[in-house]
Image: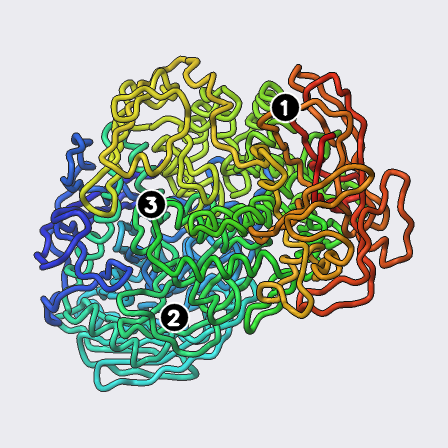
Amino acid sequence: MMKIHRTRVLAVALSAASLFGCGGGGSSTSLAGLGSGAAGSTGNAGSAGGESLVTVADTGSPTDTAALPVKTAAPPPATPVEAFTKQSLTGYVNPFVGTADATKPASDPVPAGARGGTFPGATTPFGMVQWTPMTPSNGGTDHPVGYIYKEKTIIGFPLTQMSGSGCDGNEGELPVMPTFDTASVGPGAKENFDHKDEEASPGYYKVTLKDGVTTELTATSRTGFGRFTYPAQSALDSTRKTPYLVIDATRTNTIASTTGAIQVEGKDGLSGSTVGGNFCGARTYKLYFYAKFDREITATIKGGKANVSFATGSKPAVMMKIGLSYVSSDNARKNLEKESPGWSFDTVRTTASDAWNDRLNAIQTRGGTQTERRKFYTALYHALLSPNINSDVTGDYIGFDQAVHQVQDGRTQYVNFSNWDIYRSLMPLTGMLFPREASDMMQSLVNDADQCGAIPRWAPVNSDQGIMPGDSGVPTVAGAYAFGATNFDAKKALGYMTLVGNKADLRCTGSGLRDDANRMGDYLTRGYAAKDNGWWAGSLTFEFATADFATSQMAKALGDTTNHRLFLSRSANWKNQFNTDRKQLLPRFRDGGWMFDPTANADMVEGNAEQYTWMSAYDARGLIGLVGGNAAVVARLDAFFQDLNAGMNKPNFYVGNEPSFATPWLYNWTGTPWRTQKVVRDVINTVFFDDAGGLPGNDDLGAVSSWYVWAAMGLYPEIQSVGGLTIGSPVFDQVVIRWADGAKKLTLDASGAGTNAPYIQSLKLDGQAIDMPWVWLADLKKESTLGFALGTSESQWGKDSAARMPSFGLDGFDSLDAALNNHGIGIDGQATDRSLEGYTFDMGGWSYSAKALAAAGATPGGTVSFNGIDFTWPDGKAGLDNMVVQGQTLSFAKPQAAGTLALLGSATVASTAPTGKLTVTYTDGTSQGFDLRFDDWTLGGGGGKVGAYNKVALTTDHRVDKSGKADTTKAFVFYWDAALDKQRMVKSVTLPFQTDNGAVMHVFAMTLK
């Protein structure tokens, strides 16, 4: 177990703005026992746009050569939480957590998932600069490279670093290294440090190398400040050593040789650039710098590598400030001059510490053990490392089109969006706590889309790598919006959401297809991405469906009824891959066949079928019904949680990777919330730790850490893109979440809280008892209090709430008109919205012709009579004119007796007529099942015959494509009926949720007679 030392020193006074008033503190964590450093007592200095800009006043000159006096102290006591009284919380942060292989490892982790992949270096919240030590990669076996705790060699201190990402190219640019031997610097360096000589705290890192040089690092948002203390001159003279600082623009963490350039600026400065990036194969970019020293320098520059020497004399602490920019060296200079004009290292360090303390104080806690508080605030710290500031103090940034752009006044551009990882829990947390910054992050994604044509999926610096499947940028935006980040162009964002959800071959400028066109094409036309599409395709449907649900909720929030209904129906596409025999979500082929033994991380991305079965939590009630009801689900989940960090292959929970994040809370939808409370607490207690191996998998830019923050508070954003929280139980006696307006807070009071006391005995919201493990965010954004009574024994609290828990399935319709979800009738000569194929009947680009239908007798809102039955043809006023069959339940306000159920409809992508089970439910509780079948709407382009189960109700002489152009292919509407028991009253009709051959059925009209 590590030793943690915390220290406090005198603070340098600053005139600075803060989030919640003045005060604060700093501390250092040393895994091996040394502790010294500064403690801040002032707030975050300044602000610019959507960021709380970390900058400092000019309070020093180049004479600050030694650290202020230090005094070792114990961690701050857990004082009662009082409104707007800032606590000193940085002392609970251990930046080394996640730098070693997991203490509780997965048996077969995802690639790069054996350790957290975090770093201990100096940075600020969402900072552009993340200045950290870099170690070798265990002989090339550990990837991605960064800081690996078991290594004993530092090969440089690069100024950038992604936290917990899973690919090479994770930044690590411009390594700086103090030395006496320039030839020894780099990947081949020998062992040169010991962890006992190392410490870190938010905004500060320090290590003394074996050659006696002490490196101290701190940062502002866009600049780094280094203090490199060499041995005294007398010691250097006796050994004839020359102190150097090597700046290498020719290598990064994972690029062994790259293009770099450095030039001298006056007597005490350098500027230059390096080519970095290439994250997971994404394109590279240029990173520029401008550095100033506190003394004159001599620089020997060769091929982009500078060996900088200087006289130390009576000032052995050499200070260097360095600004970064992705635009130009001149902008790097401006960033440096704006954010770090003075020469007081300790002032900058204090300001960085205060910036972190401000952020950590967004959530204050009382009670809990010291270990629990360290785990919590370290997790919150890691959750605030990304996304990262990318625009300069001038407002300049490089866009996805590789041109220089200007942010809107008052805004900041951000990069490094690990959207597949962060949409589930990180962005809701950021949106809730810091809506101003999160709004700028969302506007950044909209800006990216303006430049590249789509909301990015996985966006490192100025490109869409798109390594993970689906359209994960969509739920990222919708989730942030639902949790409070609304100050961005949400209408334009929705336009891009509907674009990516309706187009098969969308490209991002400078990149290839976002996904193979056949994948999205399959999803649109069949309702699932067929396994025929190869790698990872087996789980792609669930990602696309999640994006569709997010789009539906965004559309609803903005008053777009048409897209709300259309995309909500598509969010049910996950059911097309539910195998009723296995009662499991499985890959499916285009012919409707199943893959019963999918391979983890080949057929399904980074997981297995059992893990993905539980992913679609937005329709929890629908999922539970298909699995077999509450009791069956509880039994399955009990088995699932026998392992809490299983890895990719075992059919168990894997908290170290994102697809399983929401699963522990599904018990809340089964009437057994005490099981959620126990499982979540077991994960907190047995999988997360406060040592270097404290994370169960790679942190994915804060995703895993954000899960822990929610879990420890006893809340979770279970339903993506919906502003509500399901309830577990807090670890702490009290949690206070301070809303960004500075005037209101949410208090979680938990009497009886304890490490082994997770069970809710009762719960009140503002004094009123509630018996359901769900709260709406809108009800908490006032001055609200959730009062928990916790205990060590299970209670039956919430046992009768399952039916009242929110679930967004397709079971609440009172008429067919309310269930219409497809735009299938086009106008000759008129294109669909943006000529998108998703707004056509077959969702592949073709629709019925309104003109041809009218000629056949079907007009909007009119009556179509066939086989002695009158049908009301859809009026299309809502922009929707038919229903894609997806398991909808249509309930009749007035049940009626009928001898016949008749439907008008057809099928698409149907080489043979699909079959699906339709159920009629009577008021006496009995039901009848029927095989619903429709032939293909064009009879296979004219070569097919009508089956005995159908009759041709309408024949049209042509159809139209997405541009409004007609062809001569005939299109048909078919009649289907079933005989009912006219002695019983029909209560509802439930349509098939899937078909036997994977084809899609549509219904235009339904009549009981």
Label 1 Cα neighbours within 10 Å, binned few <14 / some 14-19 / many ≥20: some
Question: Which numbered mark, 1 or 3, is in the foreground of this view?
Answer: 1
Residue annotated with mark 1: 895
Between residue 111 and residue 866, name the one nearer to us: 866
815 sits to left or right of 684: right
Q: Earlier in the sequence, mark 3 or mark 2?
A: 2
Q: Can you give x and y, in whole percent of width and height, for residue 532 in the image? A: 76, 52
Point 33% across, 56% down: residue: 487
Q: Is residue 228 visible?
A: no
For residue 807, above or below residue 549: above
Q: Earlier in the sequence, mark 1 or mark 2?
A: 2
The residues bearing labels 3 and 2 have C-alpha atoms spaced at a distance of: 35 Å
Residue holding disc 3: 432
- Which mark is in front, 1 or 2? 1
Q: Earlier in the sequence, mark 1 or mark 3?
A: 3
Relative depth, front residue between 183 and 463: 463
In this view, 86 is above or below 389: above
Question: Which residue: 32% across, 47% down?
Answer: 381
State the residue position of label 2. 174
Spatial CA distance of label 1 from label 3 is: 45 Å
Amino acid bearing label 2: Leu
Q: Residue at x 31, y 59 (%)?
A: 209
Which residue is at the front of the view, 841 or 862?
862
**Coordinates of residue 606 in the picture (x, y in percent):** 60, 46
Q: Is residue 536 above or below residue 649?
A: below
Q: Amino acid at mark 3?
A: Met
Q: Residues within 10 Å of mark 2 (few under 14, many from 20)?
A: many
Identify the image quadrant of the C terminus.
top right
Is residue 30 toward the left or the right of residue 188 in the image? left
Quadrant (top left, top right, bottom left, bottom right) of the N terminus? top left
> Which one is in front, 999 or 311?
999
Q: Is residue 655 left or right of residue 981?
A: left
